[in-house]
Image: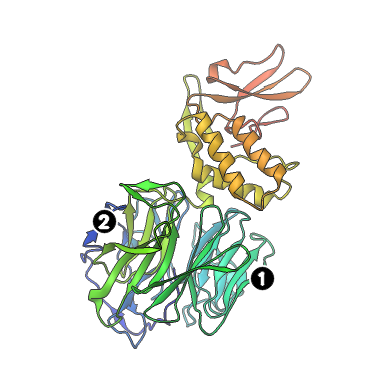
Amino acid sequence: MALAFAVSLSLLLVVPSGAPAFTTVSAPFTAGTDVATGFPTCAVSPGFPAEAVGPYGLLDDGSYLYFTDQCNHHMYRLPENGGAVSAGLDGANGLDGVLVKIGGHYYGMAIFPGTQSEPGGPGLYEFDPGTLAVAGGGAAPVVSLATPSDLAIDPQTGDLFIGNAANGIVRVHGLPGSPVVTTFVAGSGSNLYAGLSFTSDGSILYATSRYNYPNIHVVGFDRTATQVFDVVDPNQGEGLAVAPPATTVNGVNVSNNVFVNDNGTNGMMPSTYGKITRIDVNDSNTETAIASGGTRGSAVVIDCHGFLLVTQTDRVERMTPAFFTKPPWCAATTTTTTSTTSSTTTTLVTTLPPSACPDAQVAAAIEAMVEAQCHCSTASNHGTFVRCAKHVAKATGSLPRSCKRAVADCAARSTCGKPGFVTCCRTTAKGKTTCSIKSDAARCKATKHGTACVGRRPSCCDACVSGGCAAP
């Protein structure tokens, strides 16, 4: 996602609802299909009356899709299968920017000032996912920012990084709760940081730098904020997404490739709009247009199934197939598993022992990465899952050694990659509870005068509590 120009609300445009999204799609993608349609549209600025924008913020929480639009500062909520925004919940809550979920709390950005935006000014606000109402009526943001644009969650720490246009990139620690804001990359007059996306291991933060229009730069920073990547995107890129490592799709090696949703090369010529560019970091940063013929692109997000969602002028497209790493909040959703004797709900993200990983936020972030990349319920076998978990922990350089060992231990003591297996919590008559892995639920039997229950978590690290099974 990115901040391009101030939107003029007086220049409303009508884009035919039947307009094609992309006329050409090539590998690794096979198609782009509508997931949300019917957004109001308006000119991006008076100087570019033919260049129309509409949807901007995107969020999939596993049950619903949430969208903001830049033209009337509304938010829309649709079922996860999408549809026309007119059929969903419509909230005039003043938000018009990117969306994120952290620690069970929902946040959205107010970007453009105006009578319909938040009274507290630009910044990050909390909203109610049920009503779409902004907390406190928008009187004060959770984080105040001068020129906010896109954001990304650090896979290693769970911190939020926010592009602040010419004011650089900031790091927000402590959400939900009392946020602490520090500068990650200082601003300058020659950079307008917008779209942000981390690599799966958090080693590089990519951003679009939208100063030298139309030759937008895609830049990358390591964890010390040193710039380590700089490529010109002549198609005026905005939103970014980074593919996971060791990934080949439809014959194309997309490992750690950067995918960019482009505006177009000429704001006065709609024929140049609507491209998605792949930057191959494994092949001299070669740039290839893998979708074209659409309308004006801006935002990018990954949904809870690993699909890339991209905005076009009046709609949001889902690019297939799914191969991206899911957002961390998606990994915490539940899935139903059935055995021959019982049906249980299993939480797939493990809670690491506090003795090994005392920072709960870091522990949660690394285990979300493990589930997002290793997929407990669908791993081909147990050994593959354990090796994947160890790789994720090892790649996270700043993780304490004790925490890395805990990641490997909890993966080894799990049912992941073992279809039908369960965690079994047995409590003796004296009240001592232990956990073991059983090949099916029927084998989870109580000791004499004791009790037993089938765990609702896949790892013995957190499946049991004193006296029985932990809640899912």
Q: Which residue is mark 1?
A: 182
Q: Nearer the viewer, residue 87 or 349?
A: 349
Left or right: 221 with respect to 251? right
Residue 462: which quarter of the image? top right
Q: Residue at x 66, y 63 (%)?
A: 173
Q: Earlier in the sequence, mark 2 or mark 1?
A: 2
Q: CA distance from mark 2 to mark 1?
A: 41 Å
Outermost residue on the front side: it is: 284
- Please state which of the two labelled residues, at mark 2 or mark 1, is closer to the viewer: 2
Q: Residue at x 76, y 41 (%)?
A: 355
Secondary element type, mark 2? loop
- Circle number at residue 344: none
Q: Where does residue 92 sit, x and y in percent of width and height?
A: 45, 70
In the rendered structure, which amino acid carries the disc numbered 1? Answer: Thr
Q: Quadrant of the N terminus?
A: bottom left
In the rendered structure, which amino acid carries the disc numbered 2? Answer: Ser
Near mark 2 (Cα within 10 A), the count class, few <14, some 14-19 or many ≥20, is: few
Q: Nearer the viewer, residue 414 or 423?
A: 414
The scheme the figure's colours follow is rainbow
Q: Where does residue 166 sit, x and y in percent of width and height?
A: 53, 80
Near mark 1 (Cα within 10 A), the count class, few <14, some 14-19 or many ≥20, is: few
Q: Which residue is mark 2?
A: 26
Q: Quadrant of the C terminus?
A: top right
Secondary element type, mark 1? strand
